[in-house]
């Protein structure tokens, strides 16, 4: 009976498969016990926890392995970063920052030496002026009147001098003639007196005639002496009046010259050739010249520029007059301007507690219409060239307790050694003492710091 049912059911499934109808699934139990569901959830959570723990352990193991590999590679790289002490050619340089400045005398503030109203102003900012070119004029009416007055005083003094030179010599001549006349009268009186004395001895004349001859002699003698004094006074007076007249002429001429100079001050000219950098006054303004002349314009000669480079006190001992220098400015970063050190200021410039010294660089490269005052310049001053000096990379030199130390590799070991250093050329540094050619040094200190022997 059962076998028949089985055959029947098999026949039905075969018929269904042939017809394309899916077989019927066995039915599940309508309800699962609550205990079975809870056990299944607990098993699932446990599997997830174990999975997370395994993942964490694997990540930790991977990180430890990566760190170990990196540390080993770093130690290897550190171990192989070495350099050999060898001779090199040094062209050391000093770097400094400075500014383009006018040379001494290349920037002039032009002003007025007298007070007055500005009548004309011929200059404008940016104009090119030649030496001696008029840039401004003040009112000249009162100054021209003063010149005319001084001219009249000079002509008056010259007229007085001409009168002295013309009249006084004639007075001297008259005094000389009077003296000659008095001298002749005196000579005749002297002869008459001698004759009267001779006649009185011979009783040929009277005592009265002798007395009269003596009186005439004394009068003639006194008149001759008076005429001689008059001549001397005339000559002395002429010399004195001539000297005074000439002095008056000289004084008047000096006053006239001073008036002309004052008049010239009303015309302001350019003392140098250059470009008008600034204008400080306008037409119609009244300027007053006091202790300091008022500035009308400022003129700069752009062909006479220099660079003031501020060198640190550490490097100033290496800089000398005549060394070659190169600088660039931000306006033309691709252009290198050549120069030469021409002066070193003895007084330091202290800014923010940093001591610098002003080094003047004369510009050799033509720079017309390129450089302007106050442009920032980055300067390289080339020191003397030194050939065949021992050198190591600067990174190999460590600073420990105020000493310069390198780590020398010998017999597979690195030992610290104190050295003395000299110049620095880029990434290389000169070894003055402490190392021999051919020795090997570490570029970086070992992980474990070693003590100096």
Image (cartoon, helix red, strand yellow):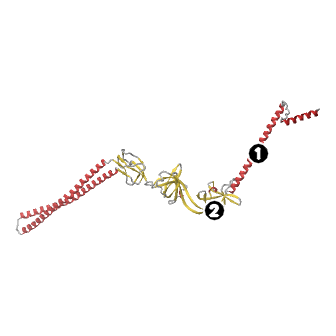
Q: Which mark is residue 20?
A: none
Secondary structure state at the residue bearing disc 1: helix
Residue 322, horizontal then vertical, whole percent: 50, 60
Q: Is residue 91 left or right of residue 279?
A: right
**Residue 314 at x, y percent in the picture:** 55, 55
Rendering quarter of residue 196: bottom left
Point out residue 367 in the picture as x, y percentages from the top left corner. 48, 55
Furthest toward the bottom, the residue is 202
Q: Residues within 10 Å of mark 1 (few under 14, many from 20)?
A: few
Q: Position of residue 247 (x, y in %)?
A: 26, 56
In front of the other: 396 or 136: 136
Mark 1 or 2, nearer chain start: 1
Q: Relative to 206, is 128 above or below?
A: above
The reply to whether residue 263 is in sight is yes
- Decide if residue 343 is in sight here: no
Q: Is residue 411 left or right of residue 109?
A: right
Q: Residue furthest top?
A: 30
Q: CA distance from mark 1 to mark 2?
A: 50 Å
Residue 240 location, quadrant: bottom left
| Quadrant of the image occupied by residue 37 | top right
Name the secondary structure under disc 2.
strand
Residue wearing tag 1:
58
Q: Which residue is mark 2?
A: 86
Pointer 1 with pointer 2, Cβ within 8 A: no
Q: Is residue 22 above or below residue 113?
A: above
């Amino acid at each position: 009976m059962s076998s028949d049912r089985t055959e029947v059911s098999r026949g039905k499934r075969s018929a269904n498969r042939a017809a394309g109808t899916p077989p019927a699934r066995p039915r599940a139990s309508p309800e699962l016990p609550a205990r079975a569901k809870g056990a299944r959830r607990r098993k699932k959570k446990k599997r997830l926890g174990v999975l997370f723990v395994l993942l964490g352990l694997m990540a930790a193991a991977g990180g430890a392995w990566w760190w170990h590999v990196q540390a080993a590679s770093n130690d290897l790289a550190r171990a192989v970063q070495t350099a050999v002490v060898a001779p090199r050619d040094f062209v050391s340089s000093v770097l400094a920052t400075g500014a383009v400045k006018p040379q001494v005398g290349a920037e002039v503030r032009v002003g007025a030496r007298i007070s007055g109203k500005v009548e004309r102003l011929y200059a404008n900012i940016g104009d090119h002026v030649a030496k001696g070119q008029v840039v401004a004029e003040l009112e000249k009416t009162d100054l021209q009147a003063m010149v005319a007055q001084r001219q009249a005083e000079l002509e008056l003094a010259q007229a007085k001098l001409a009168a002295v030179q013309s009249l006084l010599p004639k007075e001297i001549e008259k005094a000389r003639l009077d003296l000659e006349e008095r001298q002749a009268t005196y000579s005749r009186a002297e002869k008459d007196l001698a004759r009267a004395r001779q006649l009185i001895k011979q009783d040929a004349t009277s005592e009265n005639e002798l007395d009269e001859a003596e009186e005439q002699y004394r009068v003639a003698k006194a008149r001759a002496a008076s005429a001689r004094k008059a001549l001397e006074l005339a000559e002395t007076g002429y010399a004195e009046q001539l000297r005074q007249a000439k002095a008056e002429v000289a004084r008047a001429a000096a006053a006239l010259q001073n008036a002309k100079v004052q008049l010239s001050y009303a015309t302001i000219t350019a003392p140098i050739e250059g470009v008008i950098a600034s204008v400080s006054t306008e037409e119609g303004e009244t300027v007053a010249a006091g202790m300091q002349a008022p500035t009308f314009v400022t003129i700069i000669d752009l062909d006479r520029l220099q660079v003031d480079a501020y060198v640190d006190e550490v490097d100033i001992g290496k800089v000398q007059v005549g060394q070659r220098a190169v600088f660039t400015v931000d306006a033309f970063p691709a252009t290198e301007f050549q120069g030469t050190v021409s002066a070193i200021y003895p007084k330091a410039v202290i800014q923010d507690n940093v001591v610098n010294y002003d080094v003047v660089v004369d510009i050799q490269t033509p720079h017309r219409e390129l450089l302007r005052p106050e442009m920032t310049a980055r300067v390289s001053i080339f020191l003397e060239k030194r050939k065949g000096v021992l050198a190591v990379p600067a990174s190999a030199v460590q600073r420990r307790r105020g000493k310069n130390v390198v780590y020398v590799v010998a017999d597979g070991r690195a030992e610290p050694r104190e050295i003395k250093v000299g110049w620095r050329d880029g990434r290389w540094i000169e070894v003055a003492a402490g190392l021999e050619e051919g020795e090997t040094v570490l570029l970086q200190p070992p992980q474990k710091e070693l003590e100096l022997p």
